[in-house]
Amino acid sequence: MAHVLAFANQKGGVGKTTTVVSVGAALAELGYRVLVVDLDAQACATFSLGIDPEDVEICTREILIDHAAPKTAIIKTAESVDLLPATIRLADADAALATTKGREFSVRNALEPLQNSYDWILLDCAPSLGIVTVGALIAANSVAIPLQCETLSHRGVGQLLQTVADVRKYANPELKVAGIIPTQFDGRTTHARAVLADLPATYGVEVLPAIHRSIRFAEAPAAGRTVLSTAPKSIGAQNYRALARAIVAL
């Protein structure tokens, strides 16, 4: 059975999608079978893995709403990970699911036929706490929280952790918090070091290996690859390999 790991933070711009695809590529390097599931209508994970959302015929919306067979939508990528892509059509998924019976379990039900085909299923959640994101938490074994190393990025993490607690209470008692992933970390600044040092006491969860700020992350999506391919020896690639090893060891 695959381990389903959701990456969630309702604040945008924290490096969530970069983290999802880079961890996926790093896990693939370690020999694991990996599926990335794009649950964000912005389709950034899809684009970052070299797939043009405009060319996608079946996306996660058709799987969640129209009950299309998930295997019909899977795309193999150059990063040795498989992808369930998103498109802008996913934008109305929360509204479409709102009146659907059992909507909380839509993501779990969609992933069930794929459980035996992968070792890791990584969910790239939208920057919101809507129905699809809550569904992802219900489907997941664990959740990782990418968090930019700046004070303002802390806003909302408490709300996300409360949502996790609610999901545990009502729908998925086995859900674990894998930890916080500090992103865009600049160790040269006192502020970033202070934020990083404060995380364990503030949230009471594990802090996973930090991802250092690097221009290489901005360059990689333009090539439709991850930093592990475009700059394999860079500090960013090394960081994500260390993060993947830490996640496997949890």
Image: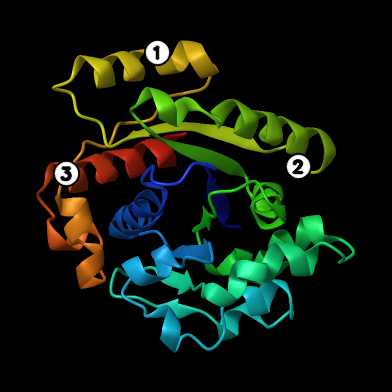
Query: For the point 76% across and 42% down, which residue is it?
Result: 172
Q: Residue furthest front?
A: 152
Q: Nearer the viewer, residue 136 or 149?
A: 149
In primary-sequence order, the first of circles 3 and 2 is: 2
Q: Report if residue 173 is visible in the image.
A: no
Against 238, residue 207 (above or below) is: above
Q: Report if residue 167 is visible in the image.
A: yes
Secondary structure at badge 3 equals loop
Give the label on residue 172, or none. 2
Against 63, residue 134 (above or below) is: above
10 Å crowding of disc 1: few (<14), some (14-19), many (20+): few
Instruction: Tell whether label 2 touches label 1 (CB within 8 Å).
Output: no
The image quadrant where one finds the N terminus is: bottom right
Q: Is residue 19 left or right of residue 98?
A: left
Image position, residue 229 (x, y; %): 18, 62
Residue type at the position of mark 1: Asp
Q: Is residue 76 left or right of residue 60?
A: left
According to the picture, the residue beneath numbered tag 1 turns out to be 198
Query: For the point 75% across and 65% down, which residue is it?
Result: 95
According to the picture, the residue beneath numbered tag 3 turns out to be 214
Image position, residue 146 (x, y; %): 43, 38
Which mark is in front, 3 or 2? 3
Image position, residue 164 (x, y; %): 67, 35
